[in-house]
Image (spheres, helix red, strand yellow):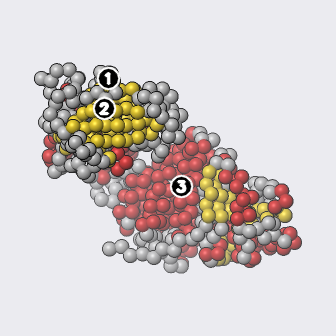
Amino acid sequence: MESFEYTAHTSRVIFGAGSLGRLPDEVARLGATRVLLLGRRAPDLGPLSVARFDGVAMHTPVEVTERALELLRASGADCLVSVGGGSATGLGKALAARTGLPQIAVPTTYAGSEMTPVVGETAGGGKATRRDPALVPRTVIYDVELTLGLPVPLSVTSGLNAMAHAVEALYSPQANPAIDSFALDALARLARALPALVDRPDDADARSDALVGAWLASICLGAVEMGLHHKLCHVLGGSFGLPHSETHAVVLPHVMAYNAPAVPAVMRRIAGALGVTDAPAGLVDLAARLGAPMSLASLGLRDSDLATAAELVTAKPYPNPRPVDDVLVVLQSAFSGEHPVSGGAPGIGAAFSSGGAPDIGWLTDEVVASFAGASSERLRDLLGDLVRRLHGFVADNDLTEDEWKTAIDFLTRTGEMCSPTRQEFVLLSDTLGVSSAVDLLTNSRSPATTPSAVLGPFYVEGPPAVPPGTDLAVDLPGVPLRADVRIVDLDGNPVPDAVVDVWQSNQDGFYDVQLPDLEGPVLRARFSSDADGRVWFRSILPSEYPIPDDGPVGEMLRATGRHPYRAPHLHFMINAPGFRRLITQLFVAGGRYLDSDAVFGVKDELIVEFPAAPDGTRTVEFTFRIAPLEVGRA
Ligand code: BEZ
Ligand code: FE
């Protein structure tokens, strides 16, 4: 059973491109009128800004803080605004600690001290840490535009620094479900955004992804205690003068490999977030791909420093999932920059991960690299990601050769079942929820529109165009139905002349195409909406039906104890010039299988009452809201 304590620090966060423009409003929101600006990049706020301090320095030296304090007092400032990396934020905190003034932080790197209640100050060669919830900036503005110009090397190392916050949060003694999800999302975002930034430094979407990741990682840093990695970096920076974010970038995978045997489940979660099979190896590969420094030797550490560094690291207790008695091993592998091996035994059994199974990471990398010459970037990325996930699946499940053969045989038979009238692969995609996932991603980007639902295999192009009020059932048996629907735009205005195709099953659950003895198209037609956007027709109440289950998909359903039924529904396809096509279904409220639809197609908003009229006819009324072409993605 889980048990944890969690204190969330409160701050107001404004995120977005151009959000720096909100600064004057945010100052006013704090009730302030006289701002001390910290950092060269702080924008002039006109009469609001009473002074600027440009002398920000690394490691927050007390002498610098004293000078800024003099300026602060002389100016009568009642608010601090820092714009810059960790040093600017640190100075803001140091001043807030001395004056109690509210501060607004505008971080321009991914290093992430803006969400933490901590500031480390240096004086006379030593470092002292203050921790106080009041040190958390009251407001943090993340402006993606300010990060567009962040040089690639700094983007990379400060991004890896942010990843270190997320990694160590996951195995911290204070780890908890809220922080875990922030940490995993941060890792996933940074792992995909940083390579994109290296390729396209001014890609605003990738910058935004990275900055969200850095924010989430910063929350982790502020909420829980960090472990061996942070202690090591602290010692290497403080006692050996190694540069901050570069040191983080080098050390992290080596500490992860050392800690891996103590927290295998955490490492699996991290690997999942990174989309790799082995977390430490995946991270070192990522760092290499990003062109990050790879060894402490390259940062200027000397061989002879290692033993002293190891002693300093072990001198004081701090939380870490694996006892830190063997820290020299970590330092040695980080020093030489060799590929870390989970388990902390560099050089021994390099091809084997901690569980004794061969590590296939090198193979994955080789296959992914083979796509480098793909005809488009998208093709390269999709195939690379597919291979990483497939290899991850094989490795994580230790897939046997027999299981592999079974899967190949299943797919072969799925292909053999396909014909012009039967698409078993689409059915497989439907029953695995993949079709609904693609549908959701493609069509559900605008909450104001009617949700879409899968097309299914029973749509026939060009159904007969018929006048309003036509009976689709002709004289098929069933409970009579009258449907009255309207098509409107996002403002509720009627959409006339929309082409509305309708199709459904009969009362036994069959579509006409499944009944070769039926004459002509039945239970399917095309209508055109009138000036009021209206379409109405007669038919019969649709019933639940089984999807075709006489092939491999049916086998899969039976093998997993699933039924093949779809909840009763009417299909609609709505096309109107200037609008996005809407393909959807209306489900009969109270019908069977609404909770366990075989193709995961049911959405709450599409479950509709079909009340009975006095003469027993069931009725349905519904308004479809369709989106103009420019809403959503192509
Ligand atoms: C349908 O609703 O027609 C359908 C959708 C997916 C698979 C099978 C049938
Ligand atoms: Fe259907």
Q: Which residue is mark 2?
A: 537
Mark positioned earlier in the residue sequence (3 or 1)? 3
Q: Which residue is mark 1?
A: 466
Q: Could you tell me which secondary element the residue under label 3 belongs to?
A: helix
Vertical side of 389 occupied by 50: above or below: below
Taking depth in this image into account, of 448 and 151 the one nearest to the observer is: 448
Left or right: 59, with 521 as reference point: right
Task: Give the numbered dot on residue 213.
Answer: 3
Left or right: 228, with 458 as reference point: right
Q: Could you tell me which secondary element the residue under label 2 belongs to?
A: strand
Q: What residue is at 74 percent from the left and 58 percent from the top? A: 24
Mark positioned earlier in the residue sequence (2 or 3)? 3
Quarter of the figure with residue 107: bottom right
Q: Amino acid at mark 3?
A: Gly
Residue positioned most to the bottom: 316
Taking depth in this image into account, of 207 and 618 the one nearest to the observer is: 618
Q: Amino acid at mark 1?
A: Val
Looking at the image, can residue 625 be seen? Answer: yes
Q: Could you tell me which secondary element the residue under label 1 belongs to?
A: loop
